[in-house]
Amino acid sequence: MRKVLLAILAMLLFASPAIGAESCTQSILASGPYKVYNIVWVTGAAGGFTATELDQPIDGIVMLVEFIPSATTAPTTLYDVTVRNSSGIDILGDSAVAASEAYDGVGANLSATVPTDTQPLLNGNYGAIPVMGKLTVDVLNAGNDKGGTIRIHFLSIR
């Protein structure tokens, strides 16, 4: 009986951290100066993904951002993404302060099933924008243990 209880306790201890654990896998696909920063995310138990600074700096011109919902664990419809520079400005045009609930940029209210792409939005204008340094990605209102991919297309100046 003691062995059974120890086995159950061990299973609970090892299984519980995996439940609702958020994750982020980052990679950069490159072909000369043209690069794509690939971010695969999974939300935690609270339905969001903690704002995460990317491992590598962009140091270039961001031209396009893609949002691709997971085919197997699609996020809740109308989920939100912000991509902030080192000054806290969302390159997707969200005018609210970080961690606010009033999202109004092009990363707001995304589809749970249809991939979306957009150019950055700065001061109400779409277009390529310079970014020096690391970006911080935040996913909100996506549901528990949901996932997707964000791809940031940029021309590197390094």
Image: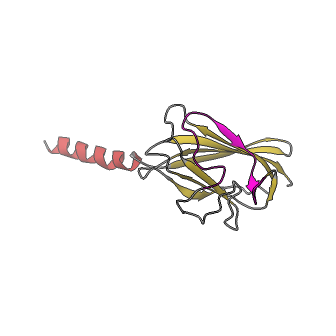
Q: Which residue is pictured at 66% across the width and 66% down the height?
A: 88
Q: Is residue 121 magenta?
A: yes
Determine if residue 111 is in view.
yes
Is residue 47 depicted above or below 148 in this figure? Answer: below
Is residue 92 depicted above or below 151 in this figure? Answer: below
Determine if residue 60 is in view.
no
How many numbered circles are shown? 0
User: How would you classify the magenta stretch by its main secondary structure?
Assistant: loop
Q: Is residue 29 magenta?
A: no
Quadrant the C terminus occupies = bottom right
Image coords of residue 3 (percent x, y): 19, 42
Quadrant the N terminus occupies = top left
- Left or right: 2 in relation to 46: left
Image coords of residue 84 (percent x, y): 67, 60
Please tell me in which quadrant of the rendered image residue 116 appears. top right
- Left or right: 110 in relation to 146: right
Please tell me in which quadrant of the rendered image residue 85 appears. bottom right
- Left or right: 128 in relation to 53: right
Q: Nearest the camera: 6 or 83?
A: 83
Residue stretch rendered in magenta on the structure: 104-125
- Left or right: 26 in relation to 99: right
